[in-house]
């Protein structure tokens, strides 16, 4: 007989996404910058779902969205028909027609892209204005600063033909305020922005909002912090949590000292332990590097409010947790445990899996029951 909520029982784990917290994080960053905040919603809005995220932010007044791929831009465009949607990865050869069809804006990152876009515009195609990306540190995407300055000087040239509406650059290490690269990037971009006095400019990602002596220009581009990630690692998190993850215990058992647990017996009980098996695993996006072996520490879950470490390998659909220290009655068949939430914030979960909170967020699986609140 089914007594539990059938919807819950049909899934191993539930992802709760607080769209009100997302919106208030966006407002907070805009206030902090003292300028307009855009929203970076690439990678399915960092795993929380591009449609709900864009819809909620657009309703709250967000007018500028950034994604990585055209396919993501098409989805963002449907959710926010009037907004400007920038494609950070820029113009792939021959893709201008798709930009025109969906009213998307490429972030042009090379001379070749700029010329291709300009000549497409000259065919009379109806397109939105593009952004120009100048690379001030990353050596990844964007024009060299010198190329940017040269373009600014030839006023009637490619820049005018391409109808550029924004000039931007991206921080390489803004989460580390002690990194001297920040000041160098701020100075290099100041020169670029000054060379294009008529164009709005954009520099700040999430952590950029918390750097000293960094102008906000006309538009900021937060991603991670919108979703509750800590833009000031090592300091208290100023953002509200957006994502919570809970899974159900399906079995518990007691094991004696010397018992090996999980695939390949990589964890051995040092004493009598109580174990619980929960139904989520690496196929749900929980990194296998969260495995806890005899030699390597890994991830943990909150059981009855107590942090309990994983045991053995994270398997495809299951994780075993040492619940010996969990409060009486909290680690029973059918009970829920927390994988993301409270003290298990994105940074802590990332560290337990030898990665960063960004990767935890963007890996959030499709198999969860997704429960959206607010928005
Ligand atoms: C991903 C990205 C951002 C957002 O960075 P966060 O650190 O998540 O705030 C901003 N700008 C560019 C160009 C990006 O690629």
Image: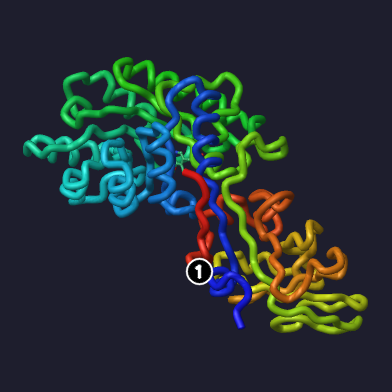
The answer to which quarter of the image holds residue 225 is top right
Whole-percent x, y for residue 72 in the image = 34, 52
Whole-percent x, y for residue 203 in the image = 45, 29
**Apparent side of residue 219 relative to residue 150 in the rendered image (left or right):** right
Q: Which residue is mark 1?
A: 367
The answer to which quarter of the image holds residue 82 is top left
Q: Residue at x 56, y 24 (%)?
A: 183
161, 60: nearer the viewer: 60
Secondary structure type for disc 1: loop
Whole-percent x, y for residue 81 in the image = 27, 41
Q: Residue at x 50, y 69 (%)?
A: 367
140, 124: nearer the viewer: 124
Q: Is residue 187 visible?
A: no
334, 219: nearer the viewer: 334
Q: Residue at x 61, y 54 (%)?
A: 244
The total of numbered circles placed on residues is 1
**Apparent side of residue 77 relative to residue 274 in the rendered image (left or right):** left
Q: Residue at x 72, y 35 (%)?
A: 235
**Apparent side of residue 4 relative to residue 156 in the rendered image (left or right):** right
The correct choice, above or below, for 292 with respect to 118 in the image is: below
């Amino acid at each position: 007989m089914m007594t539990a909520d059938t919807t819950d029982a049909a899934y191993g784990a539930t992802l709760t996404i607080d769209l009100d917290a997302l919106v208030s994080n966006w407002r907070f960053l805009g206030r902090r910058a003292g300028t307009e905040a855009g929203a970076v919603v690439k990678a399915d809005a960092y795993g929380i779902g591009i449609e709900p995220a864009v819809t909620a932010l657009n309703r709250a007044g967000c007018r500028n969205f950034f994604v990585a791929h055209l396919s993501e831009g098409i989805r963002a465009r449907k959710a926010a028909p009037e907004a400007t949607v920038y494609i950070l990865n820029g113009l792939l050869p021959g893709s201008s027609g798709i930009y025109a069809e969906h009213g998307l804006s490429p972030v042009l990152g090379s001379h070749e892209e700029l010329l291709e876009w300009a000549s497409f515009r000259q065919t009379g195609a109806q397109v939105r204005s593009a952004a120009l990306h100048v690379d001030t540190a990353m050596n990844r995407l964007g024009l060299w600063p010198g190329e940017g300055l040269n373009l600014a000087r030839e006023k009637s040239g490619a820049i005018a033909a391409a109808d550029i509406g924004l000039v931007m650059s991206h921080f390489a290490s803004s989460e580390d305020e002690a990194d001297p690269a920040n000041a160098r990037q701020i100075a290099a971009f100041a020169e670029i922005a000054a060379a294009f006095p008529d164009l709005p400019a954009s520099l700040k990602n999430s952590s950029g909002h918390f750097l000293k002596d960094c102008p906000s220009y006309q538009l900021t581009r937060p991603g991670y912090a919108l979703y509750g990630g800590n833009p000031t690692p090592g300091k208290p998190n100023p953002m509200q949590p957006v994502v919570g993850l809970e899974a159900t215990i399906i079995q518990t058992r007691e094991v004696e000292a010397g018992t090996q647990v999980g695939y390949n017996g990589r964890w051995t009980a040092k004493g009598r332990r109580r174990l619980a098996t929960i139904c989520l695993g690496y196929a749900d996006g929980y990194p296998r590097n969260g495995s806890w072996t005899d030699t390597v520490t890994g991830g943990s879950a909150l059981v009855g409010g107590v942090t309990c470490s994983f045991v053995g390998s994270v398997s495809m659909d299951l994780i075993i947790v040492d619940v010996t220290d969990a409060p009486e009655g909290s680690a029973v068949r059918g009970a829920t445990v927390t994988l993301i939430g409270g003290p298990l914030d994105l940074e802590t979960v990332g560290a337990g899996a030898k990665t960063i909170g960004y990767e935890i967020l963007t890996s959030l699986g499709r198999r969860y029951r997704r429960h959206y609140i607010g928005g």
